[in-house]
Amino acid sequence: MSVVTMTMAKALNEGLRRALERDPKVLLMGEDIGKLGGVFRITDGLQKDFGEDRVIDAPLAESAIVGTAVGLAIRGYRTVCEMQFDGFVYPAFDQIVSQVAKLHKRSDGAYTMGLVIRLPFQGGIGAIEHHSESPEAYFAQTAGLRVVSCSTPNDAYWMIQQAIEHDDPIIFCEPKSRYWEKGEVDLDRPAHDLFSSVLRREGTDVTLIGYGSSVKTMLRAAETAASEGVSLEVIDASSIAPLDLAPMVASVEKTGRFVTVQEAPHTASIGSEIVAELTQRCFYSLRAPGIRVSGYHVPYPASRIEEDYRPSVERILDAVDRVMGFDT
Amino acid sequence: MSVVTMTMAKALNEGLRRALERDPKVLLMGEDIGKLGGVFRITDGLQKDFGEDRVIDAPLAESAIVGTAVGLAIRGYRTVCEMQFDGFVYPAFDQIVSQVAKLHKRSDGAYTMGLVIRLPFQGGIGAIEHHSESPEAYFAQTAGLRVVSCSTPNDAYWMIQQAIEHDDPIIFCEPKSRYWEKGEVDLDRPAHDLFSSVLRREGTDVTLIGYGSSVKTMLRAAETAASEGVSLEVIDASSIAPLDLAPMVASVEKTGRFVTVQEAPHTASIGSEIVAELTQRCFYSLRAPGIRVSGYHVPYPASRIEEDYRPSVERILDAVDRVMGFDT
Amino acid sequence: MIDEELVQLLTPEGERVSHPDYTSTLNSEEIFALYRDMVIIRRLCNEATSLQRQGQLALWAPLQGQEAAQIGAGRAMAPMDFSFPTYREHGIAWCRGIAPEDMLRIFRAVTTGGWDPQKYRHAVPTVVLGNQALHAVGYAMGIQRDGAEEAVLALFGDGASSQGDTLESFVWAAAFNAPVVFFCQNNQWGISTPSSLQFKVPLYRRAEGFGFPGIRVDGNDVLAVYEVTKRALENARVGGGPTMIEAYTYRMGAHTTSDDPTRYRVDAEVEVWKHRDPLARVKALLTREYNTKSSAFDDVVAEAESLALKLRVDVLAMGRPDPITMFENAYAAEHPLIEEGRREMIELGVSAGSPA
Amino acid sequence: MIDEELVQLLTPEGERVSHPDYTSTLNSEEIFALYRDMVIIRRLCNEATSLQRQGQLALWAPLQGQEAAQIGAGRAMAPMDFSFPTYREHGIAWCRGIAPEDMLRIFRAVTTGGWDPQKYRHAVPTVVLGNQALHAVGYAMGIQRDGAEEAVLALFGDGASSQGDTLESFVWAAAFNAPVVFFCQNNQWGISTPSSLQFKVPLYRRAEGFGFPGIRVDGNDVLAVYEVTKRALENARVGGGPTMIEAYTYRMGAHTTSDDPTRYRVDAEVEVWKHRDPLARVKALLTREYNTKSSAFDDVVAEAESLALKLRVDVLAMGRPDPITMFENAYAAEHPLIEEGRREMIELGVSAGSPA
Ligand SMILES: Cc1ncc(C[n+]2csc(CCOP(=O)(O)OP(=O)(O)O)c2C)c(N)n1
Ligand SMILES: Cc1ncc(C[n+]2csc(CCOP(=O)(O)OP(=O)(O)O)c2C)c(N)n1
Ligand SMILES: [Mg+2]
Ligand SMILES: [Mg+2]
């Protein structure tokens, strides 16, 4: 077993490299991804090694990046589109929702829309506006799409490769605040299927469910809680759509209580979906309603105060207290 | 009290006329809304009476329709943008999410984004693809926006006027399958505030909650149920975002059971949100989990089979059976 | 003559005219074949309109008036070229070999597809204005990467020319020198919107500002459309980059069967264009220059008639699909919500179960 | 001379050149005033860069090299005109009277706004490329409806010229003959993307294909930029419709303080542009033609220095806002989720409560 330690950014870079090596039909396309290697350096060195025809520096137009990737898919290519930041995916929304999501159906299966849209998402990096958004639920809602998010370097390395190999279009959400955190990567085999929930920590009192940047926050909350004698189970909903509900159900049947965590505001969000599904599936096990810890219902704030917008350990523990106090 | 009977289409037309008469800063803009009067004739005759400067036939570009309406708002105008069909709002998504929703905040309150985006939504008219979509949750999720939907001619007449007068941007969803249904319109005063849930039928066994086209379907389901001795309460969530939860909570505390109904697929939808909120607020009153009746998680199907996609009386009653059988 | 810069090889009266850059390369059989295509597609289109009037189609988007533009362009394509249509390109579809009944499936609302786009090298229709122009450029970028000598025809209307996607596709085609020919049928109207609102100078001139040639062709002159499109496609295939062709034509009928054009345009305009009919001029040429017999024309009419009859029969035979088919091809791989939906539908008993 | 079609009134060496269509109308005081603006904004920009390096700003987008483009355009505006900037238009903001510290608030990440856009008639910055071009056209349509003699300046970069919104804004400006001047600073780069990828022919030519004039001006020549912009705005104000101005210039520094331009461009290119410095040529002109004393130049440097010092003091004084302010102005009217969030935050005790 060959295990190496690297950052999530590097793991994504290596994963992309493997995919480019393995399949000549794999292309990367995006703004500044070639010579510059992307503003987060995720594609660093790849244009140099695979050429300008496979690692394509795009003119500045997101609808065109996705729209031409659709044409390339019809021609048999698998394009990994990089959106420079979450807030810049919206110009491509029409192509994603009306074409990427629907063309497999609309062509009665003749087209394979095996493309990946990489989305550095969520906040926490002290950026200016439009650079810290959480648009995952827009895509999760959309029939025809799949949405996943990595939370560790190992997952990043494997999930990006699995996503590229998959035949359905995938919105690949990368928690940009975790790009520079290191972790072990097993270069031999993936830890799990692409569309999985992953148990990150076992516990008995309350189940925490979240994804992306929130996974680390949940784990820190669990540490703190443990020191106070409260045992939290942590589930990484790394498959945001479809949700892999079975591990969540198993956990909630055990704990009887759960809290969802996300940076997006709560309205019609992934948290809402998890609450709706788990309430239905675990009704008799539930000792308290599921509570959502999320960003507030305001435009993402100036980054000097973003940590009071993003779910914090404190807010998660407050919610844990609430669900634990519910039936007492 | 002057009450007249008219279709929802006519009620919207009359409501728009009142708004144009009342405030010279009100403009209408959209594709084919002038000479043609709109493909649904909602703006019929308005250009003739108010001139081409106030009822603006737009070139064919939705992003430009919304983007210029933003500029007009900065100049002090209140523009009602017509999207020709739900499926054509996505080219404007970027302007709506990044600008319309955020500019009041981003200007520290200096800009008033008092614009209305009219969206003929939902299916049921036998149309081809992209003409029957339910994108309301995309907008409901988005902080900075409000989303409402009318379900009767009276509401249509009043809500469009209230929406135009309101200072926040509003996505105004019109159930196109109900455009041609008649109802009484009270020309003297509105029945309720713009951001209200409306009790449409009283009942005691199960609460049905939906909006737009689903209101009529729910009422028909309630009729059928009544004939079978089951009493359904029907709530029109005509304020989709923000939800007016108090009447729903009151109802569910009474019935102990609820079903949500919508044409959109259930993932991260308005139904999910209602379930999450009501579960939290009515946990001890609930005798069964809330169940969502919705469109399936597929691209809107060919219209010859759309009635098997849209929530039907049968599917609603099936869900009612399920929530009623839950604790027995 | 509508415009000095318009490429025209055949006048409305059927007289040949010379053009400095283009001459017709077609012989009498080939011209007759184009004529036949136009007669047939017009007849089929009329049949579709009447099927719609009789409640057999949900909608129809007639091509009347645009036969020369579509047949000229469609026949200029090589077999390995690929086209990206809107919802009105029945003439192109015909040239690609797609069966008439397949063109009508989407309008009968029994499917969201209709034909196998990969087999016929003709994409499924795009209703969202402008989206397909980017697909065309992307496909063309794939051709470049494959080192193939193929070209792409991107179809759109005068109205769609205002959409961001169409305009971005020009930027991209230029940036990558993509083997794509933009073929805009300027039929003067986008539903009720006159093309004069979409562009203040002739549309074909827009191409130049993006760095590739634009050319305006008499869209009602099948000989001119054929030559202009053929040369542009050939040029694209050998690395010459994109061209934009504006086929200047007219939508003789309603936008769709749901539309009422009397609300926004005057009869006189339609009358003017009647005199520019794309079929009449070719018939005049064939008669005068090649002495084509009237029986040959009669044969084409008869053929069109029988195709129309077959179309009617085929359409009437298209039954309501099993609702369970809505779950097919929503995703390529397994998906829990698809399974859940399918199960629910089967339990509700509205379907006999998945045929698969 | 970079391009024959470039309007230039002052060479990099500070020699006046004549142009068939434009002559400088400015006297020595006015030229000196423009020079002063450029010196000050460059100095302020440098101060901002060093504040960022010292961790006092989250980010900074320097304008070095583009002083003439921005000051020339900004000073060409009439008080009642309105401008729609991107994130780099500090020179325009300066001309509109906005306090330097207000320009930096967004970069210190203490607000998403910064100044009162209605008071200064200068919109809040737009980061999403191209969005503001449509706002500008819409605002101009409002001017038309008000019957006012005002014009709008829509600012964007070479990179943003590829976005659908920018291109749609051209369609709309032409369709409605809107009183808007599109002012594109072609600084040759969009982060690492060379402008040669965004357009294959000079950008200003794109305007013509949309039906209005395009003009390329030496963006490092403040006299030329001033005259060209002034005339275009005047023309717009009296109903002459839109103009697109391409100010040909160069981004001397990094895209932002987060960027490392050595990864994608060569020093030699930067060297070439150093010789085209927008300030040096005006200083040369003032010295040679008007005998401006060196003490006058020294005074400007001193003034800029003290403004920079004040800026530093002001920025350092900007504390972290009370988190509760995130709930202000999210909506104009009451909203239950705002109330809920505010309450939760107060209960969590992270805020002293709403100041309002
Ligand atoms: C993005 C989008 N907006 C609006 C529509 C509604 N619509 C359908 S066809 C049409 C007019 C298109 O005109 P044009 O491009 O000239 O094509 P034509 O119908 O004349 O062939 C409109 C506005 C649409 N299909 N897509
Ligand atoms: C829609 C969108 N996509 C991507 C970005 C990221 N981005 C910020 S600036 C920039 C380059 C813009 O170049 P240009 O328009 O030439 O302006 P300049 O920075 O040179 O002033 C990019 C790609 C963005 N802000 N908006
Ligand atoms: Mg047209
Ligand atoms: Mg630039």
Image (spheres, coloured by chain):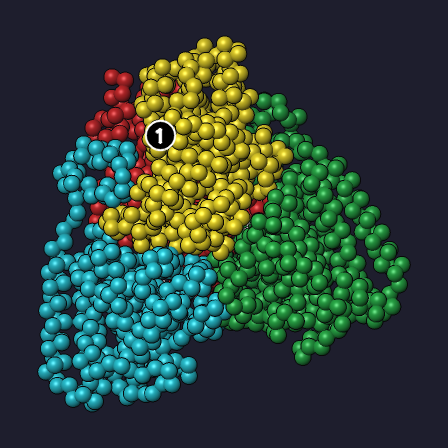
Chain colours: A yellow, B red, C cyan, D green
Graded by Cα atoms within 10 Å as few (under 14), some (14 to 19) or many (20 or more), the crowding at tag 1 reads few
Tell me the subunit letter for badge 1. Answer: A
**Image location (x, y in percent) of residue C280:** 23, 82
The image quadrant where one finds the C terminus of chain B is top left
Q: Is residue D124 left or right of residue C145?
A: right
Q: Which residue is mark 1?
A: A189
Count all numbered tags in the image, as a single digit.
1
Q: Is residue A310 left or right of residue C32?
A: right
Q: Nearer the viewer, residue B118 or C86?
A: C86
Q: Is residue B189 visible?
A: no
Q: Quadrant of residue C63?
A: bottom left
Please give the name of the residue rendered at 57% of the width and 49% of the height, measured from the top-left corner: D263
Q: Quadrant of residue A249?
A: top left
**Image location (x, y in percent) of residue C322:** 16, 44
Please give the name of the residue rendered at 72% of the width and 65% of the height, measured from the top-left corner: D222
Image position of C216 with respect to B61: above or below? below
Q: Is residue A68 visible?
A: yes
Q: Is mark 1 within 8 Å of ligand 2?
A: no
**Image location (x, y in percent) of residue D245:** 61, 66
Q: Does dot 1 land on a helix, a strand or a loop? A: loop
Q: Nearer the viewer, residue A15 or B87?
A: A15
Q: Is residue A295 left or right of residue C108?
A: right
The image quadrant where one finds the N terminus of chain B is top left
Please give the name of the residue rendered at 42% of the width and 83% of the height, measured from the top-left corner: C4
**Image location (x, y in percent) of residue D152:** 62, 61
Please give the name of the residue rendered at 38% of the width and 67% of the height, measured from the top-left corner: C239
Indicate the amino acid at tag 1.
Arg
Q: Is residue C221 left or right of residue A122?
A: left
